[in-house]
Image (cartoon, rainbow, N blue to C red):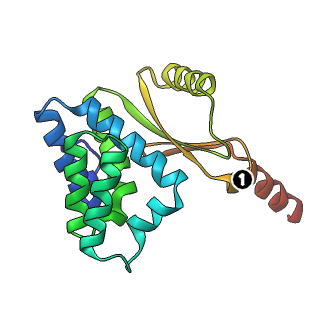
Amino acid sequence: MENSGGIQASLAGRYATALFELARDEKQLQAVGGSLTALKAALAESEDFRRLTTSPLISREEAVKAVAATATAMKLDSITSNFLGVLAQNRRLGQLGAVIRAFNLLAAAHRGETTAEVTSAHPLSDDQVAALKSNLKSRLGRDVAVDLNVDPAILGGLVVKIGSQMIDGSIRTKLNTLAHAMKG
């Protein structure tokens, strides 16, 4: 995985690489990817789940029990369930978001896709995601997977990162540019 852009160098990258390789070897990439998508949504939507992954006050044993119960309740695949247990046991649940992002990059590269990190002020509809993928595919000449994130602070528009390239079409940046030009 030399072409993974330094993903393996980080702690989250090492965990993601181990998870990816296990899922690939067990022919469970799709199942693990689906479980990670569900976990990403839980991190975004559930304050309790976010607290479980970040609070230093939760003991190792409590965290292990809580993630086992969460995995069962969410009907996660066994590889992802076991992986969550490993993160909890190693007190690395705080890395979960970064692990999910790194796993998605590895999975997209495995499928021959480029991954675009897309940040919007509000969740995008399925039609908007399809249009965005189509636009990016025509620009880049290859399939593009999108890693969607929501950040109300950008006010509107999109910020798209593909590798080291960034297209910032956010309203916040446009307003900042306008304000800077008016000072000028």
Q: How many marks?
A: 1
Pointer 1 residue: 173
What SS does tag 1 mark? helix
Which residue is the extreme one toward the right? Answer: 182
Give the camera-side residue of 156 and 91.
91
Q: Quadrant of residue 166?
A: top right
Q: Amino acid at mark 1?
A: Thr
| Left or right: residue 120 compared with residue 4 | right
Question: What residue appears at the point 16 percent right and 34 percent down from the top-left corner?
Answer: 24
Q: Residue at x 20, y 42 (%)?
A: 78
Q: Is residue 123 above or below residue 184?
A: above
- Is residue 92 something that shows in the picture? yes
Q: Is residue 50 left or right of residue 160?
A: left
Image coordinates for residue 182, horizontal then vertical, percent: 89, 60
Q: Can you see residue 102? A: no
Q: Nearer the viewer, residue 33 or 89?
A: 89
Would residue 92 appear left or right of 177 to someone viewing this image? Answer: left
Q: Nearer the viewer, residue 52 or 101?
A: 52
Q: Position of residue 126 (x, y in %)?
A: 58, 25
Q: Quadrant of the N terminus?
A: top left
Q: Quadrant of the C terminus?
A: bottom right
* Image position of 19 (left or right of 73): left
Residue displayed at 40% across by 40% down: 37
Q: Residue at x 77, y 58 (%)?
A: 176
